[in-house]
Every structure is written in structure tokens, then in C-alpha cells.
Amino acid sequence: MKILAVDSSGLVASVAIVEDDNLIAEYTINYKKTHSQTLLPMLDEIVKMTETDLATVDAIAVAKGPGSFTGLRIGAATVKGLGLALDKPVIGVPTVEGLAMNLHGSSALICPIMDARRNQVYTGLYRFQNNELNVVKDQLPIAVEELIDTLNLLGEPVVFLGDGVPVYEAVIREKISVEYSFAPAHMNKQRASALAVRALQYWENGIFESADDFAPEYLRMSQAERERAKKEEG
């Protein structure tokens, strides 16, 4: 089973090719360029370097949201175009599940946080049991203080990761009462290889769709949509 995975849901852009239990190639960049500038050149580079014929790919995985509205749209457009051109299915993986896969084998409660602005984060709670990722709380947008209250009530050690950590680290340190830690640099951002591993589990459970049917999941309205709704209410 060969999966091409793409993640442009946040600040990081990442592309990977994973075949069964082997990571063939991964290209991840966290720099001041838009994903529209980086994603296709990254994809082209790993395809050339590995001499991969994209026709041999079995499915295309993508972070389906939540995350940056622009980033999700770029990722969706990329995989839909590839899927339609190659006649390959798409496996949409919830963004924070892909992030949680970075910490495979952790015994702590895993809490990915992505900055959703307005003192909110996109998050979910996860736990590994028998090497399987289990969803404790499905992904959602939530105020960071409310998330910390939830974690304090659960009373378990927790590890944080994601681009929301540097934004809300001071608040976490001030308000959290349970044992906690922050994932190190090589584990704390989106990685397409981790997304691909989760996508393979989805595939084995028959969870995939056609490129034509795939659409990102934003979890909340964009700023433009909120402003339009506010005007209509007024």
C-alpha cells in the first residue's frame, strides 16, 4: 500500500510518500512562504528524488481540517487535482489526529493545539492503547482557558504539541495543575508521514472517498463569513 500524503493545514507544509511500514520520502518546511509557493515544488522534488511514478500510488492522504482556511483550501485543491488526474481515492484525516500520531507510544494524554486566533485553539484529546490511537475527545475549537480547565478535571499527565504551543505556553504554565510537558522540535508540528500512517488505518477500515467528493472540514466559519452573517443579522 503506497500513500502520498499532503499537509498544508497550518504554518508547516509537509509532503510524504509512505509504502506499508516504510517512509520513502518526506519534505517538511516551516518558513515564511505561502503553501501555494511551496507545496507543488516540494511534491515534485520528492517524486523526482525517489523516481516515483504517481500512477503507482494507491491513495492520496490529506489533512482535512481544522486549520488555516487558506492552507486547507490549497491542500484540498492539490489532492483533488491529483486524485482526479490519477483516478485515485482520497483519505481525509482530521488534522489534530495527524498531529497526535507524532507521539506514537506516549503514555500521556496527548493534546495537540493549533492557534485558532481570538484566544481559541483547535484541539482534541488522544491516548495510545496497545499501539492504537484512541480518540478521548474529538477535535473542536475551544477557548484555551476552557481546555485547561478540562485537562485539570481529567487529572492526567498531558503532553502538548502544535503551533498553538508558543502562542499559549505562558497561559498553560500559569493555569494548568496537572503534570505536563511540551513535545520536542522534531515532534511538535505537522508531519505528512504521521498523517500517512493514520491514513493507512483509515484505509484498512474502508474510510476513504473519491477526489470529486472530498471537501475540507473547517469546524467554524471564516472571518469573512462571520462578518457577512453579522451584517445580515444587523
Image (tube, rainbow, N blue to C red):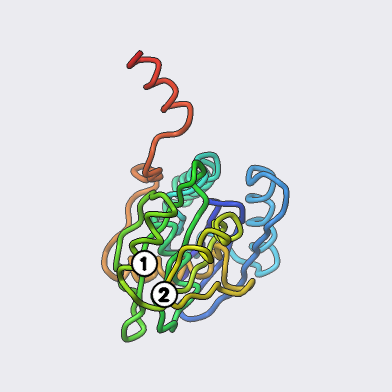
Residue 14 image label? none
CB atoms at circles 1 and 2 under 8 Å apart?
Answer: yes
Image location (x, y in percent) of residue 215 = 38, 43
| Spatial CA span between label 1 and label 2 | 8 Å
Q: Which residue is found at the position 70% from the left and 67% from the top?
A: 49
Image quarter of the N terminus: bottom left
Q: Nearer the viewer, residue 14 or 123?
A: 123
Q: Position of residue 125 (x, y in %)?
A: 36, 66
Of residues 5 and 171, which is closer to you in this image? 171
> Residue 17's image quarter?
bottom right
Relative to 224, 154 lies left or right: left
Find numbered disc 1 in the image and state the secondary structure of the residue it sits on. Answer: helix
Name the spot of residue 155 as percent of width and height, x first.
33, 75
> Residue 185 versus residue 42: which sits nearer the camera?
185
Q: Residue shown at 40%/43% (left/top)?
A: 218
Note whether residue 221 is visible.
yes
Q: Nearer the viewer, residue 79 or 9?
A: 9
| Residue farthest toward the right in the current orientation of the protein | 32
- Residue type, numbered disc 1: Leu
**Res. 93 in view:** no
Q: Earlier in the sequence, mark 1 or mark 2?
A: 1
Q: Residues within 10 Å of mark 2 (few under 14, many from 20)?
A: some
Report the disc number at residue 151: 1
SS class of the residue under badge 2?
loop
Amino acid type, mark 2: Val
Q: Which residue position holds label 2?
A: 178
Residue 109 higher or lower than 189, as above or below: below
Percent coordinates x, y for residue 37 in the rendering: 69, 44
